[in-house]
Amino acid sequence: MTSWTQLRRLPDEQSASDPIPTSVLKQIADVIVPFIVEMFNRLLSEGHFPAVFKEAFITPVMKKPGLDADTSSYHPISNLPVLSKLLERLVVRQLMGYLSSADLLPSLQSGFRQGHSTETAVQWVLSDIIMLVGISAHLMRQLQSVLNAAAQLIFNLKRSDHITDAIVSLHWLRVPEHIQYKIAVLSYKVLHDTAPRYLKPLTRVADIPGRRALRSASTDHLEVPYF
């Protein structure tokens, strides 16, 4: 991905120290990008990151309306120069590309990686699939109660009100169906190599005796993993 593309993808935000608004910088990208590329190449070859690129303007923003005008009621928003953010994006892209191609990233790392998420990390660390499949009916009811309570809160329902219509209008599945859906989706992604690599060892094709004689022999049946 080129510097021109990365520049176009930057949000229309800038620091108070930027001499040119980001929106204007995008409009003249065809003219200015060659000079930016030359500057970035020199900085990288010399291993130098300008001090001015590290200076951020801090804007205090209130966490939520109605809080007291106290310093603890605000959180700081740091705005770095647009060229600093552009250089960072380009370096991160090249570095991640090298680490991925050389297989140097930890297989269990989910943060800041394409195709990975907090969800997949939790599923691995807590063995989410194993923990939910086969859980007791009592625990299943407790999980469903939490889901029902969330729907009641959204629609301001009483505990005595029927919850089915609220669940349907939210397009939520009941807990048992949601578990089955998540397992099916993850299994599909693993079989089609679109899931994180660390989920692959959890998926095994079952060796069913006599299945070759069946019409469904071409269909893969999966084993339930055990730990």
Image: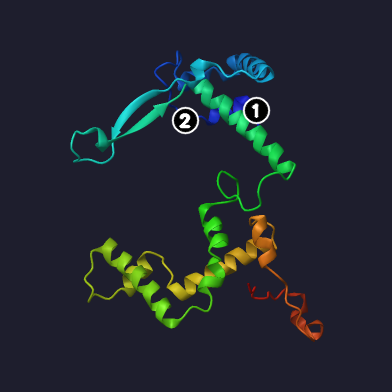
Name the residue located 65 percent from the left edge and 48 percent from the top edge: 106
Residue 41 left/right relative to 24 = right
| Residue 15 in view, yes or no | yes
The quarter of the displayed image where residue 13 is located: top left
Q: Give the x, y percent position of residue 7.
A: 56, 26
**Mark number displayed over residue 2:** 1
Q: Which residue is disc 2 drawn over?
A: 11
- The local crowd at label 1, few if under 14, some if 14 to 19, many if 20 or more residues have their Cα within 10 Å, is few
Residue 34 pos. (x, y %): 64, 16
Task: Say above or below: 159 vs 193.
Answer: below
Residue located 51% across and 29% down the image = 10
Q: Is residue 208 left or right of residue 17?
A: right
Q: Give, as a three-letter code, the residue at label 2.
A: Pro
For badge 1, the amino acid type reads: Thr
Give the vertical position of 79 relative to 162 (above or below).
above
Q: Is residue 83 above or below residue 174?
A: above
Q: Nearer the viewer, residue 182 or 98?
A: 98
Secondary structure beneath disc 2? loop
Residue drawn where x is 43% and y is 82% of the image? 137
